[in-house]
């Protein structure tokens, strides 16, 4: 998982428990998950726009694709 071994994962969990406390940890996990989901959504939208712009530029330079 992300190049981390079991020892590193346990240490990260222990540090998170010490910093945030057991009552806040679920809220922090949920916020982190929502942030990752939002980031992926924006990344996908950016990729879609990039692909559309590339297709439009190719059509402008090479002309529209010929249908046989």
Image (cartoon, rainbow, N blue to C red):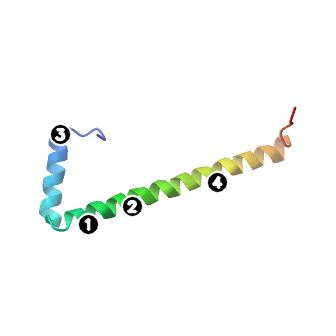
Kindly indicate the quadrant of the structure image that contains residue 67: top right
Classify residue 64 as left or right of residue 31: right
Q: Are marks 1 and 3 in contact (CB under 8 Å)?
A: no
Q: Residue at x 73, y 45 (%)?
A: 55
Q: Position of residue 24 (x, y in %)?
A: 19, 68
Q: Height in image: 48 above or below 6?
A: below
Q: CA distance from mark 4 to mark 1?
A: 33 Å
Q: Circle 3 is placed at which residue position?
A: 6
Name the element at disc 3: helix
- The numbered mark, 1 or 2, whose residue comes first in the sequence reads 1
Question: Which label was assigned to residue 35?
Answer: 2
Q: Circle 1 is placed at which residue position?
A: 27
Name the element at disc 2: helix
Q: Circle 4 is placed at which residue position?
A: 49
Q: Residue furthest top?
A: 68
Q: Position of residue 33 (x, y in %)?
A: 34, 58
How crowded pointer 1 is (Cα within 10 Å; few <14, some 14-19, many 20+) is rated as few
How crowded pointer 3 is (Cα within 10 Å; few <14, some 14-19, many 20+) is rated as few
Question: Which label was assigned to residue 63?
Answer: none
- The numbered mark, 2 or 3, whose residue comes first in the sequence reads 3
Classify residue 66 as left or right of residue 51: right
- The numbered mark, 3 or 4, whose residue comes first in the sequence reads 3
- The numbered mark, 1 or 3, whose residue comes first in the sequence reads 3
Q: Height in image: 28 above or below 63?
A: below
- Total labels: the figure holds 4
Name the element at disc 1: helix
- The numbered mark, 4 or 2, whose residue comes first in the sequence reads 2
Name the element at disc 4: helix
Q: Are marks 4 and 2 in contact (CB under 8 Å)?
A: no
Q: CA distance from mark 3 to mark 4?
A: 39 Å
Q: CA distance from mark 1 to mark 3?
A: 23 Å
């Amino acid at each position: 998982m992300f190049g981390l071994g079991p020892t590193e994962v346990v240490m990260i969990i222990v540090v998170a428990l010490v910093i945030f406390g057991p009552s806040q940890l679920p809220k922090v996990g949920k916020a982190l998950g929502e942030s990752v989901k939002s980031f992926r959504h924006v990344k996908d939208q950016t990729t879609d726009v990039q692909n559309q712009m590339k297709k439009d530029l190719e059509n402008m330079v090479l002309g529209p694709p010929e249908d046989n």
